[in-house]
Amino acid sequence: MKLQSKRTTALVAFTLTAVLSLTACGGGDAETDAATGGEGGEGGGELSLTMLPKNLGNPYFDTSTAGAEEAAEELGAAIEEVGPETASPDAQVQYINTAAQQGVGGLIVSANDPTAICDAIEEAQGAGTKVVTFDSDTSPECRDLFVNQATPEGIAAKQLELIAEQIGGAGEIAILSASANATNQNAWIEMMEAELESNADYAGIELVDIVYGDDEDQKSFDQTEALLQNHPDLKGIISPTTVGIAAAARYLQDSESKGQVALTGLGTPNQMRPYVEDGTVEAFALWNPGDLGYLATFATAALINGDITGEEGDTFEAGRLGEFTVEADGVVVLGEPFVFDAENIADFDF
């Protein structure tokens, strides 16, 4: 694939999870150490990072890059964003190879495939580059750390918390999911079902139906209509899929159920903004990709500087986000999903 031209960013308050070419001070061994992040980054050069999202021009990754740039400025790091026009693993390999050849200290990658880029990552690591995945992981053995946006347990718990708040802790609810065999969706639903059965705080809530829109807009729209017809006492809908929640909101917006049936789940600010602004949806969740890029950048710097090795139990500071601990398999979790509502949704563009 033809390489897309690189965008070198000034280190401003918002940053991309990026990797930068290092400008080293001095010469000889010090220059080499600085370029690779060796000796804790004490070679006298600027910390260099390269950010490799799944693809460029994606508003979600533009936001994560902005967070990375914010972190890079605080760290005094140089940062460069590179990437393909379309999200494919083959297209990412050439950027990984280039970063290794340039001797950057750290590479931050949202992987388009769990294994296809592993050989290239291994070569980069052999050249002294620390590799951190974010948003989308490789196999654990391929990278040094994975910065995960949220745990399945956290995603499930947040959706239940939101619907309970919006229906006053009591009433019938339903779930509008993606496909019946969607692994992540099913895991969240199982966790929500278990929590509803075991948590006394949800004793007044009854899950009456689970339907599937197959991540198709029209089918999800139709399933929302069917839920309301089949369950006239329905108080709320959880849709843990960005396609489903938007389709359900569109149906509710022009129905008599607007303001009567609560809707929450997982969505993006750009798709959900009109429904929040007109009161169809009170609040929904996802995660803040800006914070994700910010954390990934601090984690990469901690590896380069020798503050952590990526072993379970390692701890490091991540600026305004505070202290984080490396968990099993080299995973660092950002935290609970981020809640979007009328007060903050205008602050985001993805």
Image (tube, helix red, strand yellow):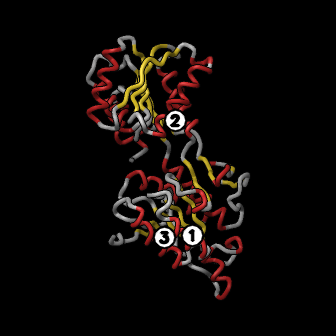
In this view, the residue farthest toward the front is 181
Pick whichever of labels 2 and 3 is earlier in the sequence. 3
Within-10-Å neighbours for mark 2: few <14, some 14–19, many 20+: some
Residue ID for mark 3: 96
- Which amino acid, mark 3? Ile
Is any part of residue 138 visible from this angle?
yes
- CA–CA distance between discs 1 and 3? 10 Å
In the figure, is residue 291 to the left or right of 265? right
Q: Secondary structure at mark 3?
A: helix
Q: Quadrant of the N terminus?
A: bottom left
Q: Position of residue 246 (x, y in %)?
A: 34, 34
Q: Secondary structure at mark 2?
A: helix
Residue ID for mark 1: 122
Is any part of residue 343 visible from this angle?
no
In this view, the residue farthest toward the right is 313
In the figure, is residue 35 to the left or right of 238? right
Within-10-Å neighbours for mark 3: few <14, some 14–19, many 20+: many
Q: Which mark is residue 187?
A: 2
**Quarter-of-image position of residue 341:** top left
Q: Secondary structure at mark 1?
A: helix
Q: Which mark is residue 24?
A: none
Residue drawn at the location 62% of the way across and 17% of the way down: 200
Camera-near label (2 vs 3) is: 2
Q: Badges 1 and 3: C-beta atoms under 8 Å apart?
A: no
- Which amino acid, mark 1? Glu
- Which amino acid, mark 2? Ala
> In front here: 134 or 280?
134
> In front here: 316 or 221?
221
